[in-house]
Image: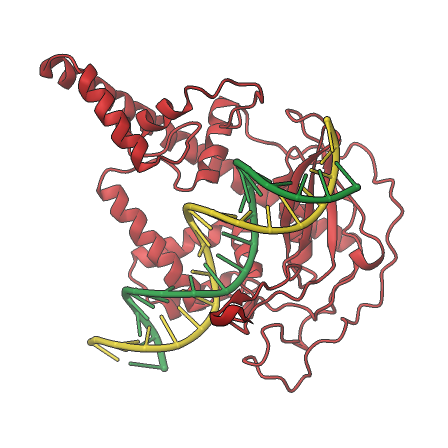
Chain colours: A red, B yellow, C green
DNA sequence: AACTGTTTGCGCCATAGTCC
DNA sequence: GGACTATGGCGCAAACAGTT
């Protein structure tokens, strides 16, 4: 079993010159009289001024995701959120671009008569130029992720401080950094507590996250679906493709994808179909299954079948194998969850330490 | 070859509508 | 007024296309 990803120790201080902190007053925001319905980005005078410039020097991290989490922990204390907008290879080095969550431009939809229109005026996108380049100065296997301090316009925001109360990404980041929030929410839901009471309880325990009853209801929807799947016997396998790949990367020590660019993909079609027929849950190297592939496989499989008794025996063995795999996955999932909780606590401690140093 | 932009699909979340 | 549900916006990453 591969060891859980560890936060790398600080190898050396950042050698970039610290970015000058620009005036902390945010650029022109909506007028203070604007109602929440007029604009989503509403300036809340109770919030601290929006930070510009670079985060404090951070230790190296083994993955860009861990670096992002550390930066997110820093950003939410400065009333904005960072998201990954790009992840790519640059001269054999892995790089990623972290942007302010308001960075994107809202893309109007094409309406009747080919006229562009806005479906919703409630977009949180302001084309904010704030961005940070992250790069891996180590190897893909032994990552040493760090960042390049933003300068000039890239170090500024074009919107007021964000309030978690009306900015879902901030709340989502809080939840990611504090897995206890989800655990407590699950526990209270199991006890049958109504959403508004759950919100009150969570606010007492995690005042900074500012959850809403909608968050609780959305969590409840997932929670109920998960419980239904478990009752139906679908346990262990992560749901999304990215989770699946991440899970298998941790589980198998690989990235769940074909690492070798020169791999022969000629058998891919077969593997897609076999995965679909053999197991409804997702497995390593999961690829989406096209209906036509399933039909083609079923036809092929029908022709190659031996006696019904042999077939039943084979299916029983396969089923037993799948049960064993599912059990391993559940154990591994629990281990990963515990490791991530520890990471989140370590990151939070680092952020606190930086805040105190400041 | 390296880099950047666009498209696509999945899942999470917000909102509006409905019901109690 | 609050809970619940359906629907659509948006974050994110991968794949692909286009450009330098």
Which residue is rendered at x = 42% and y = 66% of the image? A214
Which residue is rendered at x = 78% and y = 61% of the image? A156
Looking at the picture, does residue A37 appear above or below residue A159?
below
The x, y position of residue A173, in whole percent, is 56, 54
Position of the C terminus of chain A, as image quadrant, is bottom right
Count of numbered tags: 0
Residue A59 in view in this figure: no
| Residue nearest the observer in this picture, A19 or A127 | A127
The x, y position of residue A234, in whole percent, is 28, 38
Q: Is residue A241 left or right of residue A42?
A: left
The x, y position of residue A273, in whole percent, is 32, 28
| Residue nearest the observer in this picture, A335 or B20 | B20
The x, y position of residue A250, in whole percent, is 50, 28
Q: Residue furthest front?
A: A113
Which residue is rendered at x = 89% and y = 47% of the image? A17
Residue A219 in view in this figure: yes
Q: Is residue A282 left or right of residue A122?
A: left
Q: Is residue A235 left or right of residue A216?
A: left
| Res A232 → quadrant | top left
Q: Is residue A321 left or right of residue A120?
A: left
| Res A28 → quadrant | bottom right
Q: Residue furthest bottom?
A: A33
């Amino acid at each position: 079993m591969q060891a859980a990803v560890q936060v790398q120790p600080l190898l050396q201080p950042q050698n970039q010159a610290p970015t000058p902190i620009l005036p902390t007053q945010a650029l022109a925001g909506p007028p203070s009289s604007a109602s929440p319905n007029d604009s989503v980005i509403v300036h809340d005078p109770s919030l601290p001024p929006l930070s510009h410039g670079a985060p404090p020097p951070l230790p190296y991290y083994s993955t860009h995701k861990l670096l992002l989490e550390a930066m997110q922990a820093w950003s939410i204390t400065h009333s904005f959120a960072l998201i990954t907008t790009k992840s790519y290879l640059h001269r054999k080095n892995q790089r990623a671009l972290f942007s302010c969550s308001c960075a994107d431009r809202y893309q109007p939809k094409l309406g009747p008569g080919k006229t562009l229109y806005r479906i919703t005026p409630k977009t949180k996108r302001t084309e904010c130029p704030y961005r940070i380049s992250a790069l891996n100065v180590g190897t893909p296997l032994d990552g040493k992720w760090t960042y390049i301090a933003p300068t000039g316009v890239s170090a500024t925001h074009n919107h007021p401080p964000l309030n978690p109360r009306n900015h879902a990404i901030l709340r989502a980041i809080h939840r990611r950094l504090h897995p206890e929030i989800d655990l407590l929410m699950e526990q209270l839901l199991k006890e049958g507590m109504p959403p508004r009471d759950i919100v009150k309880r969570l606010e007492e325990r995690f005042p900074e996250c500012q959850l809403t009853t909608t968050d609780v209801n959305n969590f409840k929807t997932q929670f109920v679906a998960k419980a239904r799947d478990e009752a139906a016997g679908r346990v262990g396998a992560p749901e999304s493709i990215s989770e699946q790949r991440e899970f298998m990367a941790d589980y198998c020590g690989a990235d769940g994808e074909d690492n070798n660019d020169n791999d022969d993909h000629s058998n891919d079609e077969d593997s897609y179909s076999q995965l679909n027929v053999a197991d409804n849950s997702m497995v390593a190297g999961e690829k989406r299954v096209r209906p036509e592939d399933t039909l083609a496989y079923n036809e092929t499989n029908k022709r190659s079948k031996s006696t019904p008794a042999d077939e039943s025996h084979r299916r029983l063995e396969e089923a037993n194998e799948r049960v064993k795999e599912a059990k391993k996955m559940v154990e591994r999932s629990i281990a990963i969850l515990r490791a991530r909780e520890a990471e989140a606590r370590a990151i939070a401690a680092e952020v606190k330490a930086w805040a105190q140093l400041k």
